[in-house]
């Protein structure tokens, strides 16, 4: 039973909560032990909260997930975890996450409640509304990034929030395209909003967000404001990693029929994983060593 509950919590998805740590890195506070501790607690809180929302979504979607070739093996869809067991588990995860949020302060708690509210609204309604389903997913990543800045008491960078939003939109549209093509005639049985999408529409959305991510990141690295704040004008060196990572992901979407799970792509595709690692290492060297 424990293994099934752990699976229900989707620990592999916790990598998404790395966005909570982004403010720590880009605010130049990674060498501050107190700030690091607060940021790690914040990331742990969002691991609990996101797991609660994943479980809640699976509880709501257990019937539709049985139509999906991979999701049908999830604990609730397969019947390995009952609805009652899942409900108790969700309550415990949410209680733990909110307790940790309260420890980090009232403002952080309010942000955490907003995260729960948005994701709850997504599971109940927004995921059925074309475009709003993708935008709500993207905003949940922005909330993560903002929560990280609140946790360590630094000003939230508008560049960080905008880049997070655009990257999340890019990944979410790629996921929708993968679902639409993978499930074909069963797509609407699994996710009603897919009936409103087409491969052409999603390709257009992906094209727009691809260009936006690359251009906005370039503007960020060349910004005088950012250079002054961070004390370096060398961040442009990381641009090739971002461009290659985006193009590699597009290749996987269009030629390898991947993209259903960005997390699975990150850990399953060695070029993507290597690129992300080199990008992070280069950022740290530029900000903290040079």
Image (cartoon, grey):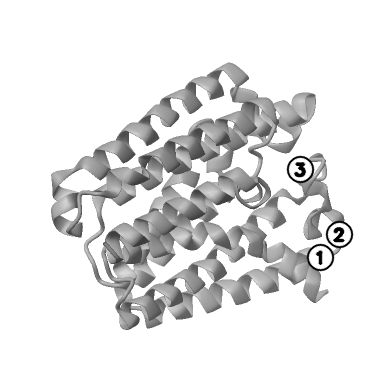
In this picture, is 62 found above or below 195? Answer: below
Crowding at dot 2, Cα within 10 Å, few <14 / some 14-19 / many 20+, comes out as: few
Q: Does 164 sit left or right of 247 as displayed?
A: left
Q: Residue at x 83, y 74 (%)?
A: 1
**Which element carries disc 1, helix, strand or loop?**
loop
Given residues 61 and 9, the one toward you in this image is: 9
Using the numbered discs, state the Cα–Cα distance from disc 3 to disc 1 in whole angstroms.
16 Å
Q: Residue 13, position in %: x, y?
A: 61, 58
Using the numbered discs, state the Cα–Cα distance from disc 3 to disc 2 in whole angstroms.
13 Å
Earlier sequence position, callout 3 versus callout 1: 3
Q: Which residue is drawn at 75% across and 70% down?
A: 5
Residue at image mark 1: 82
Q: Residue 12, position in %: x, y?
A: 65, 60
Residue 79 — which label? 2
Residue at image mark 3: 64
**Which element carries disc 3, helix, strand or loop?**
helix
Circles 3, 2 touching at the beta carbon (< 8 Å): no
Q: Residue 140, position in %: x, y?
A: 45, 52
């Amino acid at each position: 039973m424990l293994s099934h509950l752990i699976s229900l919590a989707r620990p592999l998805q916790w990598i998404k909560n790395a966005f909570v740590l982004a403010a720590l890195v880009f605010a130049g506070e990674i060498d501050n032990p107190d700030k690091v501790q607060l940021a790690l607690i914040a990331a742990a809180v969002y691991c609990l909260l996101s797991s609660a929302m994943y479980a809640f979504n699976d509880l709501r979607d257990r019937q539709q997930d049985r139509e999906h070739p991979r999701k049908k093996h999830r604990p609730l869809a397969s019947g390995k975890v009952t609805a009652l067991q899942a409900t108790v588990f969700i309550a415990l995860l949410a209680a733990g996450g909110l307790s940790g949020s309260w420890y980090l302060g009232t403002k952080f708690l309010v942000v955490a409640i907003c995260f729960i509210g948005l994701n709850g609204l997504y599971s109940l309604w927004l995921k059925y509304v074309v475009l709003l389903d993708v935008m709500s997913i993207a905003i949940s990543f922005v909330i993560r990034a903002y929560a990280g800045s609140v946790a360590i008491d630094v000003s939230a960078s508008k560049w960080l929030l905008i880049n997070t939003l655009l990257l999340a939109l890019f990944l979410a549209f790629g996921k929708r395209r993968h679902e639409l093509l993978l499930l074909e005639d069963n797509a609407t049985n699994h996710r009603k909003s897919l009936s409103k999408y087409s491969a052409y529409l999603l390709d257009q959305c992906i094209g727009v967000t691809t260009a936006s991510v690359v251009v906005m990141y370039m503007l960020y690295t060349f910004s005088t404001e950012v250079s002054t704040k961070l004390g370096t004008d060398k961040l442009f060196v990381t641009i090739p990693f971002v461009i290659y990572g985006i193009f590699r992901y597009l290749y996987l979407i269009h030629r390898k029929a991947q993209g259903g799970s960005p997390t699975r792509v990150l850990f399953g595709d060695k070029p993507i994983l290597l690129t992300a690692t080199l990008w992070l290492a280069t950022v740290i060297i530029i900000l903290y060593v040079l």
